Amino acid sequence: MRIFLSFLQSKKNYPIPSYSFWQYYIKNGIEEAGYEWSECPDADWALGLVPQSAEDLLRWKEDTWGKTVEWLKNNPADIFLSYFYPSQVDLSAIREIQRMGIPCVNFFCDHVREFRTLPEEFGAFNNNWVPEYKAIKLYTDAGYPFINLPMPMWVEPKYRILREEVNQQITFIGSKDMQRVLLLERLVKQDPKIPLAIYGAGWNGKSNGALPYENSPDYTLLKKIKFNKDFIRSQGIAPFIRKIKYRNLTYNTSPALRSRTHRSPDFETYNELIAGSMISLGINRYESFHYPLYKPNSYSKLRDIEAPMLGACYLTEYTEGLEELYDIENEIMAYLDAEDLFMKIQQLQADPAKRKSLKINGQKKALGKHNIPSSLNIILQRVMH
């Protein structure tokens, strides 16, 4: 079985959110499943996510998709597996690939954050790999084919061992955002001595909710008016009002929280912290103008698969569908809000046997059921028959 892969591959580094890890996970997962992957060597898929003019994006589509279709004509595949944002999709190219007898499946992991209704581009695929439980309704309402499967996470075999606790801290690894600050500030306020350690980008610097281009000298009044009109048209009036209300709200951390922050760890330290901390913490809420600041929405993130795979004693934020992935209380623990988080931390701190059983059971479930080979086999069975 040969899987053609378009998973944000690129030979360059662009100033956009991290993307290179996806191809690392999926390529290794394909090989572990016993399948082959192929890719168009001249295709720069990440470039399609770089902010650019409509004309430049069109040129990128024509060039990249043209090379890909031609490459597939000379190097047939059994399935086309992709990770596309809607702006990257060329509908005519997808149809041409399908006419070759190659079914097309797209993975996307930010439906809940990005969309209120699904873009028509996702309806062009033979199937869609949908990891968020809350996105099921979007696909049901749209009538698009989908398979609800876990995030594609792959862990090196050498890390698939149960490791003992190496520290007595509650570890959170992730970049700084407003919702994470608000939650963790409340946690520290409840217990100023709580052994919380935070690692990731942005925690040691000052920042606010403004988008980068809003501080740019090129962001003229006319551009501002056009952006706001487009924002209201696409997002609605309520999110626009929240955007204006919170635009000048800073989220600089308190001294108590700042004293617990650290820079992003390297790869080895990252794995050691998640697996060896007394408690590894997950936060599933996210920033969005579609929801009130103090009533955020949430969905299960990649860490909900990764941390248990690494053997963490994992405590994550409850979100709808989490119980479909794990036996909560037996394989992982989940909290509802800052007060519940504080209580669950106290319970786990006082119960070493519970922490060890969570490490064992969570790792067994994640590695045994939520792995990429299992997901690929389900997808292939669905689209090849």
Image (cartoon, rainbow, N blue to C red):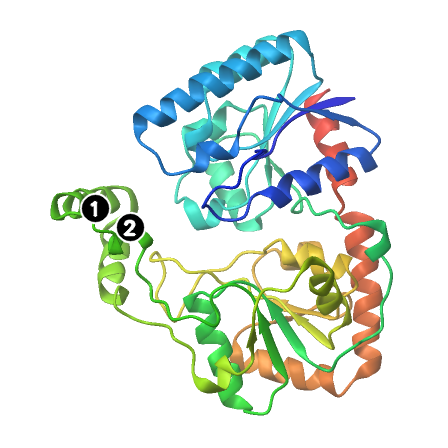
Residue at x 45% of width, y 86% of height: 255
Residue at x 61% of width, y 70% of height: 172
Q: Which mark is residue 358?
A: none
Quadrant location, the C terminus: top right
Can residue 328 be seen from the camera position used here?
no
Give the Cα distance between marks 2 and 1.
8 Å
Q: Position of residue 1 (x, y in %)?
A: 79, 21
Q: Which mark is residue 213?
A: 2
| Image: 293 above or below 341 | above
Q: Disc 2, disc 1: CB below 8 Å?
A: yes
Task: From the image, tell me which residue sits under label 1.
Answer: 218
Mark 2 belongs to which amino acid? Tyr
Res 136 quadrant in image:
top right
Residue at x 66% of width, y 78% of height: 170
Mark 1 belongs to which amino acid? Asp
Q: Position of residue 296 (x, y in %)?
A: 43, 64
User: Dot 1 surroundings within 10 Å: few (below 14), some, or many (20 or more)?
Assistant: few
